[in-house]
Amino acid sequence: MPRFFLLLLAVLAAPASHAGALAEALERAWARHPQAGAEAAREEVARAERELAAALTPAPAAVSLATLDDNLAGNSRGKREWEVELALPLWLPGQKAARGAEAEAALAEVAARRQALRLRLAGELRQAWWALAEARAGLEQARLRADGLRALAEDVSRRHRAGELARVDANLARGELTRAEAEALAAEVAVARAEQAWRALTGTPSPQHVPAEAAPGATRMSDAVAGEHPELLARAAAARLAGTRLQVARESRRDAPELAFRLIRDRDDDRSSYENSAGLKLTIPFSGDARVRRGDAAARAELAEADAELARARAAMELDIERARRELELAERQLALATQRAPLIAENLKLAEKAFALGESDLAALLRVRGMALADAAEAARLRVARDAAVSGLLQALGVSP
């Protein structure tokens, strides 16, 4: 049996292995991702908001110092007054709880969005992963074709020198070899591009082997549909955050009231002693209807948009899962047919080579059969990669990270 068919059968029978290398590559790619640092900063913002919501006052206290005397009239021995005031903003009823809920929802939204971003990055990595595998499979097939035609060209040339074949046969074999070598060079360029794309994502050289991921089970599909998909979780977290912001807007219909503690020390003239007095001041800002409507409408618009995005994401996810599942089923059926066809192709090529060696058929017939056999072998190798890529595609649609 020809060498490339032995390799083909080995590839078709190769078992799928766990893609631990892909998980490691995802960690490296995430470390290089520009949004990874931004997500860490957003998490710090959310934690700071939670600390502010847990504080005793909605804003920091303020201290003011004032003095009053009649020195403007040139009387430095007259009235003099000093005043120190400590102003404390106060929470509105229900506002503190609303702010705390908003801060917790913001932390949850940051965590959910980080997982969704990692899943999207995993999708890019999977595409680069299987593009590399397809390019390498194409290069392997191109080299096998060139090796086979090189051996055939040498045999035809030897038989031409012995007077068994015409010069046109030698030229035809040499021409086919030249075309195959050019295709192998083009395949090398495709592999180099795929390896560069991998390095751009991970910052490391591409792996020597590209293992397949384990096919998902029914439990993973039900989990995704039930709402365990990172994209759905991120959309749901955004909707909850928008809901808490609406509640904050409703509990913050005016600026925070302010309670001030005042300490006054004064005298009437230089013959009088200083006297101390203390007091309280409560400032309650008024609320404007337009301001209330603006804040409430903006929060309601954000909530409506978040709910719509969640519904759209759920519908799109169901369609993506169905599409990926059908693509996997089709790839598996095509691969099974290619596996059944491989022995027949190998036998036909063996018979054609034997007929040419015995002089029962010409070189053109052998090249035609050989070309069909090589095309079938390349298609079978591509189908194997397509099947493994379809498994990764279904995992991606289900929201399963490597």
Image (spheres, helix red, strand yellow):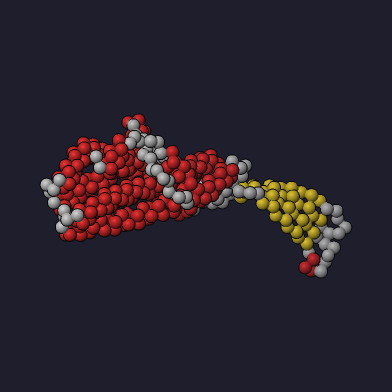
Task: Determine whether 21 is above or below 66 in the image.
Answer: above
Q: Residue furthest front?
A: 162
The picture places residue 151, in percent across and down from the top left corner, at: 26, 50
In the figure, is residue 279 to the left or right of 178? right
Q: Quadrant of the C terminus?
A: top left
Answer yes or no: is residue 110 visible.
yes
Residue at 36%, 53% in the rendered image: 191
Answer yes or no: is residue 120 visible.
no
Of residue 113 and residue 30, the one placed in the foreground of this image is 30
Of residue 191 and residue 217, the one placed in the foreground of this image is 191
In the figure, is residue 169 to the left or right of 278? left
In the figure, is residue 351 to the left or right of 315? left
Number of numbered discs visible in the structure rendering: 0
Residue at 19%, 54% in the rendered image: 162
Task: Determine whether 291 is above or below 312 in the image.
Answer: below
Q: In the rendered image, which quarter is residue 200 located in?
A: bottom left
Q: Quadrant of the N terminus?
A: top left
Of residue 251 and residue 275, the one placed in the foreground of this image is 251
Task: Determine whether 337 is above or below 150 in the image.
Answer: above
The picture places residue 299, in percent across and down from the top left corner, at: 43, 48
Residue at 81%, 51% in the rendered image: 275
Q: Residue furthest right?
A: 271
Residue at 11%, 47% in the rendered image: 360
The picture places residue 321, in percent across and down from the top left corner, at: 30, 40
Of residue 80 and residue 209, the one placed in the foreground of this image is 209
